[in-house]
Amino acid sequence: MAPSAQDAVSDIQRERERYGRRQNLRSVAISIASTLVLALLIALGLHASPGWPRVKQSFFSGAYFAQAFPKVLQGLWLNLEVLFFAVIGVALLGTLLAMIRTSRNPLLFPLRVLAQVYTTIMRGIPMIVVLYLIGFGIPGLAIFNRIPAALLGTVAIILSYSAYIAEVLRAGFQDVGPSQRASARSLGLTSGQTMRLVVIPQALRKVAPALMNDFISMQKDVGLISVLGAVDAVRAAQIIVATSYNFTPYVVASVLFIATSVPFILLNDWYSNRLRKREQSGGMV
């Protein structure tokens, strides 16, 4: 009995799947081999360097790593606490600034000007300068009693990063087509309901990768609160370095910051790839 057309198609499809699997295995094997070769070349280059033993002892000492790890980890909890409240503050202030800047209400014209000036200035000032201005300027006013350095650092991070988040959100709001707003208003939604139920959800999906990148950047900049005297992971590492004259605690702090950042980096990459595939396939973003 002659094979049917469906059987022939199935055989071709199975052959394509086998070929795809072979290509994937080949790509994985080449990737692993090239990675091992690169790692070997780096290891040989470091080992051949005359100063490598001294650098290894100063930055990658196992004994100092184990000694510094508990204290630096304890300081990391302060970084995470500051990050938690900073994310909430940046989300609220950044969204408010973006809504003011995209509003067309003539009554809000003075606020739009102030929001534009604010975002322009704050994006032009380095983060560490903002920390100095807030961390030493506010206590210098002598309006409040002693303010914790972590609180001042949180305020500085919120003021700085809200300007970046506001511009990202503003771009997302403006990317939502006018027809979406008109359709929502034709259904009887108010301006506030249209913004909350239609514009913001669509804008967030479009700018989510950019927001995640800003979050990862803010996660690293939280370590700068050590310049105000807060005993976070970086400051704890500095204290140990000052007494041991070994720089391994800085490596410990770096490893801990990387460990907290990697999950969000992978999430951002996954979501970015997902958005790109849906756009290429013509699906809804």
Image (tube, grey):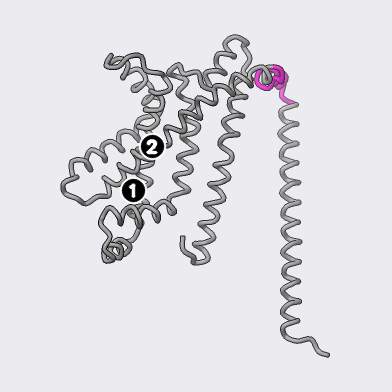
The N terminus lies in quadrant: bottom right
Residue sitting at x 73%, y 60%? 23
Secondary structure found at label 2 = helix
Residue 265 image position (x, y, % from top left): 55, 42
Q: Residue 60 magenta-drawn?
A: yes
Marked residue nearer the N-terminal end (2 or 1):
2
Callout 1: SS: helix
Q: Which numbered dot is residue 170?
A: 1
Vertical order, 282 against 136 (above or below): below
Q: Residue 90 got which mark?
A: 2
- Frontmost of labels 2 and 1 is 2
Q: Residue furthest bottom?
A: 1
* Mark 2 residue crowding within 10 angstroms, few (<14) / some (14–19) / many (20+): many
Which of 185/111 is in front?
185
The vertical placement of 27 against 252, above or below, is: below
Write the start and end of the magenta stretch as one range: 48-63
Q: Distance of mark 2 from mark 1, alpha carbons?
A: 14 Å
In the displayed orientation, state which residue is furthest to the top.
243
Q: Which residue lies furthest to the front in this view?
A: 188
Query: Residue 94, relative to residue 69: is it above or below?
Result: below
